Amino acid sequence: MSKHVYTIDTHTHALPNIMLEALVTSGRATRKDSDPTGLYVDGHLLPNFTVPSYLENREKWGYDYSVLSITAPGVSFLNNVTEERELARKINDEMFDWTQKYPDKLGAFACLPLPNIEAAIEEARYCLDDLHFEGIGIFTNYEGRYIGDSYYDPLFEELNRRKATVFVHPVAPIPEPKITEAIASPILEYPVDSTRAVASLLFTQWRKRFPDITMIFSHGGGFLPFLAHRLAFQTTEQFHGGWDYNESFDVLKSFYFDLAGTTGEAQLAALMSFVGPDRLLFATDYPYYPERLLQLQEDGFKSYGFTPEEVKKIRSENALAILPTIKDKIIKD
């Protein structure tokens, strides 16, 4: 194998025009008086995204491969099963076209029309069997129902049977607390919601039911590295199940965590103490993290003090282990 240290970005967001049109038409994307030309979702400005511009920048940043996914709110904002199925299919087909045009540069996590389980299973099969996507993308909650709820078990049974990789991206909670309009939901509520989602899996013994699903949580798992001990300890209480502490802690450590927006020294130290380098994945959150912020992320990553072996694991080897189809696309020698 080449001595080149490959970089695989497991958290790049696609913004197909069909998605933007649906957000605008439905009223889910709004404008602000202070910025009448911009479009906002959950208080955050929607960035510009085109595949050619991303690929050009990707070369400059030294990224070898990116896995595309759809960010919050997914397609559930349409509140119509037929429309959600149609939009998810169009999004997946467009991402597929991009992956076919640039097979050695782009992959994708499927967009599912949840919370409709039947439709989601059908779309997951289509994306894995026909489009050969790297995995499945889901969100932390749908209409306030978190992914540890048994409602989702039929979908997870299908994905467990396939030993699929699932990428979990946060959304705003329902109802969403408003501290101040000055704080967009992704800044605070998204990492909190990732923590809620992990807790929902732990306290429902999700991992025992679905041991063969590989699950990735965004943004370092939110506040999980700081709360893991507290959560695992609480599962030992009889009214929380009376489970073994070490088993519960191992469940929390069984997940993977991407480093999008998570390269501060304290964040990395917590993650390294919690799971070590074998469960961490390089990620950018582009285009929501523009070039200026990407540079800050890269600076934080490089200055932390990872060993060369740890750098290789985080930048590519861990991703290749759980997304093995990428290897033949990018490694030529």
Image (cartoon, rainbow, N blue to C red):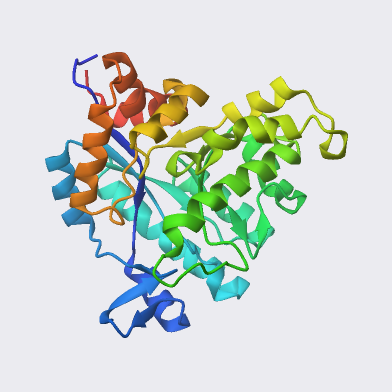
139 sits to left or right of 58: right
Q: Is residue 164 visible?
A: no
Above or below residue 217? Residue 13 is below
Q: Where's residue 120, x and y in %?
A: 61, 56
Q: Nearer the viewer, residue 183 or 32?
A: 183
Q: Quadrant of residue 177?
A: bottom right
Identify the residue at image location x=19%, y=51%. Answer: 291
- Residue farthest right in this picture: 238
Residue that protrudes farthest toward the front in the picture: 179
- The residue shown at (56%, 52%) is 193
What residue is rendered at 76% in x and 33% in y? 235
Q: In this view of the protein, which residue sits in the foreground, 89 or 266?
A: 266
Which is more toward the observer, 115 or 284?
284
Q: Quadrant of the C terminus?
A: top left
Give coordinates of residue 320: x percent, y percent: 39, 26
Q: Residue at x 28, y 38 (%)?
A: 65
Q: Quadrant of the N terminus?
A: top left
67 vs 328: above or below: below
Q: Is residue 41 visible?
A: yes
Instruction: Tell me where residue 258 appears, x and y as whole percent.
Output: 42, 37
Indicate whether 272 appears above or below 1.
below
Residue 175 percent across, percent down from the top left: 62, 68
Tell me which corner region of the image, top left, top right, bottom left or bottom right, holds residue 323: top left
